[in-house]
Image (cartoon, rainbow, N blue to C red):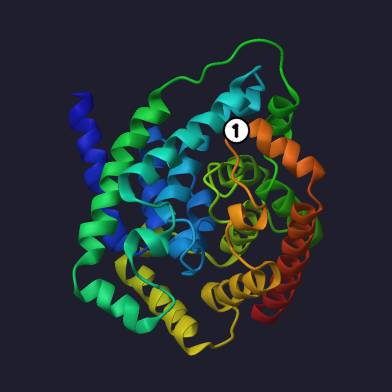
Amino acid sequence: MDEMVNRGVAAFARARILTYLNCMQATFSTLAGYLGVSERTAVVAGCPLEGGGASEGSTCGVVSGGCMAIALAHLADMVGGEGGKGEALYGRLREYTAWFEENFGSTLCRERSGVNVNELLSFIDYLLTGKVVTRCVNHIGKSVSYLIELMNRPLEGGGEASELDGRLASSGGYCAAEVMRGIREETGHGSLYLEQLSMALDGGVGLSGGLCGALGGALLAMGLIWGIDPKKEGIVGTLIPFLRGHVNLYMGRSEPELWAVANPFMREFEKQFGSLECRDIAARRFGSRKELAEHMVASETCAGVKDWCRARATQLISANTVFSA
C-alpha cells in the first residue's frame, strides 16, 4: 500500500510540473498535500525559485521545493525546540541534496537540465526536443518518491536544547530568515511561518552550496507579494502570468510583476557579489549546521550579503507595491 501511495504522489508531481509550469511549486505543493497541509502561503512565495531563481539557472526548484517540504514535515519538531532535532534536520536536508546531486549530476538547474532558461532560443530548444520530459518530469517523480521516505523518517534528537533549537523555534535559520525578517519589519510584508521554513535554503539550499540562502530569502519575500497559486488560478490563469513573466524576462521590460522585478534583482546580485552560489561567495561548502553557524558568525562577506539583500529587496518591494497600488 505504501508503495502504491508513493507512486501515486510521484505521478501527481510529474503532472503538476506540466500544469503548474513551475518546478518548485509542483514539488512543494504535491508534498504539502501528501502531508495534509492545505495552507498555500509557501506555495505562492516559492514561485520565483523556479528555474534556479527567477530563471537564472542556480539551484533547481525540485531541490529548493523538496528541502522546504522536508522542513514543513518537521515543522512541529522545530517549533517544539526539542534538543538535537535542529541539527538532525539540517542533516536531513543535506542528505537529500547529496542524493539529488549523485543521481542527476548537479543541484543547479542550468547544469542538470542543460538549458539556459533566461535565453529564449535555449528555452525553446529545451521544450521542443523533449528534454522537459526526460529531465524535469522524470527527475521530479524520482525525487518526490525519495522525499516521501525522508519526510516519513523521524528525526533523531535528545539532550538539552541548543542555540540552534531555540533559533529555529523562534525565528528560523541563519541566512534566508534574517533577510526575510528584516524585509517584514521594514515593509510589513512577510510571515514568521515562511521564515521558519526558509531554514531549508541555508548554506546554498540544504547545505548544497547552491543558490545563496540570503538571496533565496529575498525571492521568497517577493514571491509572497507577486507569486501566484496555480491550484487557485487553474491552467489558463497560470499560463497567462507565466507568458507575461517570460516576455518581460526576454524583452527586459520593467513593470510591477514578479519576473520583471526578481530577474534584474538576481543579475544585480551576481554583478555585486560575483556569483549566485553560496559556495563561490563563501569560498567553501558546508558539511554540517555547525560549520555553517561558525562561518556566519565570523564572515563579514556573508553579513554584507544579507544586508544588501534585505536593503535592496526592501527598496524594490516598497517602490513596486506603491506603484502597483
Report the quarter where the N terminus lies. Answer: top left
Task: Tell me which residue sits at (48%, 56%) in the image.
Answer: 59
Task: Tell me which residue sits at (76%, 26%) in the image.
Answer: 163
User: Taking the image as drawn, is residue 13 in sight?
Assistant: no
Task: Tell me which residue sits at (61%, 54%) in the image.
Answer: 278
Q: Position of residue 211 (x, y in %)?
A: 55, 56
Q: Nearer the viewer, residue 178 or 241?
A: 178
Hey, which quadrant is residue 232 in on the image? Answer: bottom left
Q: Position of residue 249 (x, y in %)?
A: 48, 81
Depicted 218 relative to depicted 240: above or below: above
Left or right, 214 with reference to 15: right
Left or right, 58 with reference to 4: right
User: Taking the image as drawn, is residue 16 in sight?
Assistant: yes
Task: Tell me which residue sits at (25%, 64%) in the image.
Answer: 132
- Residue at which label 1 appears: 288
Q: Nearer the viewer, residue 112 or 225?
A: 112
Hey, which quadrant is residue 18 in on the image? Answer: bottom left
Depicted 291 relative to depicted 259: above or below: above
Q: Position of residue 199 (x, y in %)?
A: 61, 41
Kind of residue at badge 1 = Ser
Give the crowd class for mark 1: few <14, some 14-19, many >=20 residues within 10 Å.
some
Q: Position of residue 158 (x, y in %)?
A: 61, 11
Left or right, 131 with reference to 286: left
Given the current orientation, which residue lies at the most extreme front position? 283
Which element type, helix, strand or loop, lies under badge 1?
loop
Depicted 269 relative to depicted 205: above or below: below
